[in-house]
Image: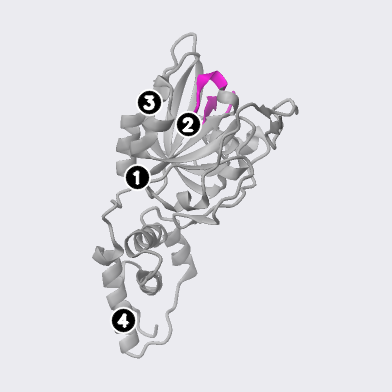
C-alpha cells in the first residue's frame, strides 16, 4: 500500500501522512462556473482564472511582515466582542468573479471538517484582517484582499470574525500542510461540500456577499454594457478621423487600474462574459474590448482628447 505524504511538513518539521488523499478534478472544471473544481498539493492549475493569473506568491516571512501585509481594508467594522472562555479567531471567505467560493479541505479531516473556510486563531499583536489574509495563504495558497465584513461565528473553542475577500495573487497548488485539497465551489452548491453547522450557518450570508461582490450576473454581456459600447464607439470615431496614436498618462493610468470600479476589473468581467456567452469558437468581443480599453485608458470616463493629443 502506497503512503501519500503532503509535500510540506507540519509546523514541527515532521512529514504529514495523508490517510485518505483527495482527488483533483480535470483542468476544464476551473473554467466552468457551474462546476466544483479541486486541486491537491502541488497539482496542475490553469495559468489564468477569471482573467487573473494563478502564480506563486512570495508571502511575508515574519510576524512584522504579516502585520503590515497589503490587502487590509480601512472600514468601519462592527464591534468585536469575544465571549469569555473562547479564543479570538479570524477567517476569510474568498469570492471569485464567476460567483464561486474558495473552500479548503483540512488534512485528514481535522476536527471533523471535510471542508471549511480558511481561518485560525489570532496571533498576539496581529490585526484580525492580517491574520485572515495569512490564513488564506497558509491554507489555500492564495493572496487575498479584504473587501468587507461577512459575519461573526461562535465555534466550539473560538469566536471567529469572517471577512469577505477577493483573490489578487497566489495559487491553490501552494496550499500548506493543513490542507489536503482546495476547492472552488459555486455558491449554490456549498451545501454539497460543507459538512459542519459552523460553516453551513454562514451560507446565506455568503450568498448575499456573492450577490454584492459579483454584480455581473450570468446574463451579463459586455455588448449590452454602455461602459464598453460607448468607449468602442469613441475608438471607432477616432480611427475614422484618421487618428493613429493614443497617448496614455502613466500616473493617471496607475490610478485607474487599481481602482476596484475601474477599467481593469471591468475588463475582467467583460472578458468572462465573452468566454461564457460567445464560446471558444468566436471570441469576437475580445479584440473589441481591448480597443475600448485603450480608449478608456487614454481618455478616462470618456473625457475628450486634449488639443494636440
Element on which disc 4 rests: helix
Q: Is residue 302 left or right of residue 160?
A: left
Most common secondary structure along the magenta stretch: loop
Q: Is residue 215 left or right of residue 98?
A: left
Q: Name the residue under label 4.
A: 236
Which residue is depicted at the point 41% across and 51% down? 32
In primary-sequence order, the first of circles 1 and 3 is: 3
Name the residue at the top extreme: 85
Asked whether the residues under the numbered discs 1 and 3 touch, taking CB atoms below 8 Å apart as contact, a structural biologist would say no
For the record, the magenta segment spans 110-126
Q: Mark 2 points at which residue?
A: 117
Which residue is depicted at the point 33% across and 47% down? 214
Asked whether the residues under the numbered discs 2 and 1 touch, taking CB atoms below 8 Å apart as contact, a structural biologist would say no
118 within the magenta span: yes
In primary-sequence order, the first of circles 1 and 4 is: 1
Which residue is depicted at the point 33% across and 83% down? 238
Is residue 104 positioned above or below 112 on the image? below
**Comparing labels 1 and 3, the label whose residue is closer to the camera:** 3
User: What x and y, as percent, mark residue 187?
Assistant: 36, 38
Q: Mark 3 points at which residue?
A: 200
Q: Mark 1 points at which residue?
A: 213
Query: In 3D space, how far apart are the residues under numbered discs 2 and 1 (Cα atoms)?
Result: 17 Å
Query: In 3D space, how far apart are the residues under numbered discs 1 and 4 (Cα atoms)?
Result: 32 Å
**Comparing labels 2 and 3, the label whose residue is closer to the camera:** 3
Name the residue at the right extreme: 13
Q: Is residue 193 left or right of residue 48?
A: left
Asked whether residue 73 appears in the rendered view, the answer is: no
In primary-sequence order, the first of circles 2 and 3 is: 2
User: What x and y, as percent, mark residue 17?
Assistant: 69, 28
Amino acid at each position: 500500500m502506497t503512503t501519500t505524504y503532503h509535500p510540506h511538513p507540519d509546523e514541527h518539521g515532521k512529514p504529514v501522512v495523508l490517510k485518505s488523499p483527495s482527488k483533483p478534478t480535470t483542468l476544464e472544471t476551473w473554467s466552468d462556473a457551474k462546476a466544483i473544481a479541486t486541486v491537491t498539493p502541488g497539482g496542475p492549475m490553469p495559468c489564468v482564472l477569471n482573467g487573473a493569473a494563478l502564480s506563486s506568491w512570495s508571502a511575508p516571512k515574519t510576524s512584522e511582515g504579516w502585520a503590515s501585509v497589503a490587502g487590509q481594508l480601512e472600514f468601519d467594522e462592527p464591534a468585536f466582542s469575544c465571549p469569555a472562555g473562547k479564543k479570538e479567531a479570524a477567517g476569510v471567505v474568498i469570492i471569485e468573479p464567476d460567483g464561486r467560493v474558495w473552500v479548503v479541505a483540512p488534512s485528514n479531516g481535522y476536527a471533523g471538517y471535510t471542508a471549511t473556510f480558511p481561518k485560525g486563531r489570532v496571533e498576539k499583536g496581529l490585526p484580525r484582517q492580517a491574520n485572515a489574509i495569512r490564513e488564506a495563504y497558509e491554507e489555500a495558497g492564495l493572496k487575498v484582499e479584504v473587501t468587507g465584513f461577512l459575519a461573526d461565528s461562535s465555534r466550539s473553542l473560538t469566536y471567529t470574525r469572517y471577512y469577505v475577500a477577493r483573490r489578487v495573487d497566489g495559487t491553490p497548488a501552494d496550499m500548506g500542510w493543513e490542507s489536503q485539497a482546495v476547492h472552488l465551489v459555486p455558491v449554490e452548491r456549498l451545501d454539497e461540500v460543507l459538512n459542519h453547522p459552523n460553516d453551513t450557518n454562514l451560507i446565506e450570508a455568503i450568498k448575499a456577499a456573492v450577490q454584492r461582490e459579483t454584480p455581473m450576473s450570468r446574463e451579463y454581456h459586455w455588448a449590452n454594457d454602455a461602459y464598453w459600447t460607448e468607449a468602442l464607439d469613441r475608438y471607432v470615431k477616432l480611427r475614422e478621423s484618421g487618428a493613429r496614436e493614443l497617448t496614455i498618462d502613466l500616473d493617471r493610468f496607475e490610478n485607474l487600474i487599481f481602482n476596484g470600479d475601474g477599467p481593469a476589473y471591468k475588463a475582467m468581467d467583460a472578458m468572462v462574459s465573452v468566454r461564457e456567452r460567445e464560446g471558444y469558437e468566436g471570441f469576437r468581443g475580445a479584440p473589441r474590448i481591448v480597443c475600448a480599453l485603450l480608449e478608456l485608458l487614454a481618455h478616462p470616463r470618456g473625457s475628450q482628447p486634449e488639443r494636440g493629443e
